[in-house]
Image: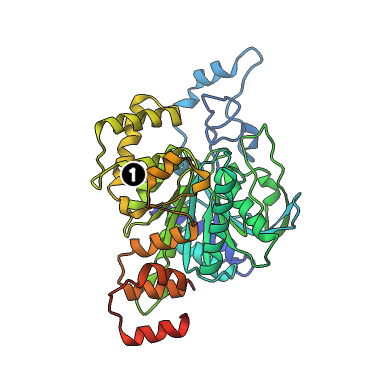
Amino acid sequence: MSNIILEHRFCGIDNDEGKAQKSWIERAFCKRECVHIIPSTKDHHRCCCGRLMGQHVGLPPVISISQNESIESSITKNDFHSEKWSISKHTQLSPTDAFGTIEFQGGGHSNKAMYVRVSFDTKPDLLLHLMTKEWQLDLPKLLISIHGGLQNFELQPKLKQVFGKGLIKAAMTTGAWIFTGGVNTGVIRHVGDALKDHASKSRGRICIIGIAPWGIVENQEDLIGKDVVRPYQTMSNPLSKLTVLNSMHSHFILADNGTTGKYGAEVKLRRQLEKHISLQKINTRIGQGVPVVALIVEGGPNVISIVLEYLRDTPPVPVVVCDGSGRASDILAFAHKYSEDAGVINESLRDQLLVTIQKTFNYSRTQAQHLFIILMECMKKKELVWFVLIPDAVSKLQRQRMGSEGHQDIDLAILTALLKGANASAPDQLSLALAWNRVDIARSQIFIYGQQWPVQLMTIVTHFAF
């Protein structure tokens, strides 16, 4: 911890000298860069951080290779790969050098987005200050965190339409923030398509914040500059391991851990920021924090681990799954239908599920068994997992499987999951529904026949809605 504090002082947070010349963003946020070259055993032209040797500005060459000596033999002789590269040992913090406004090029709309490059271990209170004070965003009444496949996949047209429409409705009616991975691939591309359709029909802009690793951003050199407006090309290079940002986002937080071409820098930062936002009060009377919900579309095996992390949180975060979107989502739906509350499933269905996991993720039997254990841990909290089921987008077998457990509207599934998962009293649930401006939810989910309500509360409700 002391090492982190010292590093942040280097960024200028606790240093009075030069404060007048530096903006608050420069003083508060840092970038991380590799300062020690350790050649990769997989690609000897690259450091273990992912960058080419020559991209380490200001660092001397690590090895000198004669004309008659191969890179491999030189590395073996000098034993340069004996030390394992690590973020803590081999990267250095310095004030961030990339923040301002992106102007996306090459699309039908001239979209703009605010952005900042920050170290992956940045404190969440600093990020929230940036969002509410520097970017002047209103604190959300709901946070929707979207997870799913990073590789491109197709959604059936009906499911894609309902997904987009429901997501937009949930965000617009409640004043929500949406968190995504920010890049133009996989589920994030589908979110972007939904926002593109919304933008062509409405002037109201949704607050959608992409939290991506700085090291995987294509054309990142175009973003270097302090408090600048930068044009950004959205055409991706098919030969590159990097990926472009999605142009329909309103803001980007780019998490930097000193690596290039690798995901992971954003994971902890995003989850800590979500947790910090959930502690902010939107209703001081009942002490209600900002509700958080995870929305799952398709996804690889890591998505099932993400679901378990949300369900085990304190308090647990409800999860809404788009059944029929493929892979992890469909496996979660199958397990939810056929498992008991204790996370137990009968032997024949267990074998069927293991085979499905193996085929879906190209896993060995051992890998499938490990993921199965994680899946069954999720099912111990199955009352917090909700499903969106689109009749025209899924098979008859899937409809029979889900029965009455699936919702057809994503916005209703999201808000119902939050109300039912909060374990709040009916009056507190009502306060939340009114804060979201969703009296329809109050009518369908909260006002239950035979329940007694205080006269004063009924007067308020009647005044607002009925």
In the figure, is residue 355 to the left or right of 244? left
Confirm whether residue 146 shows in the render.
Answer: yes
**Image point (39%, 59%), residue name:** 417
Task: Report which quarter residue 113 is drawn in.
Answer: bottom right
**Image point (39%, 43%), residue name:** 400
Instruction: Count residues near mark 1 (Cα–Cα under 10 Å), then give few for <14, some for 14-19, many for 20+.
Output: some
For badge 1, the amino acid type reads Lys
Frontmost residue, 311 versus 123: 311
Q: Quadrant of the N terminus?
A: bottom left
Q: Is residue 98 above or below residue 348?
A: below
Frontmost residue, 448 versus 149: 448
Q: Secondary structure at mark 1?
A: helix
Counting from the top left corner in percent of width and height, residue 260 is at 57, 39
In the figure, is residue 427 to the left or right of 109? left
Q: What residue is pinned by disc 1?
A: 337
Counting from the top left corner in percent of width and height, residue 433 is at 43, 71
Frontmost residue, 124 versus 424: 424
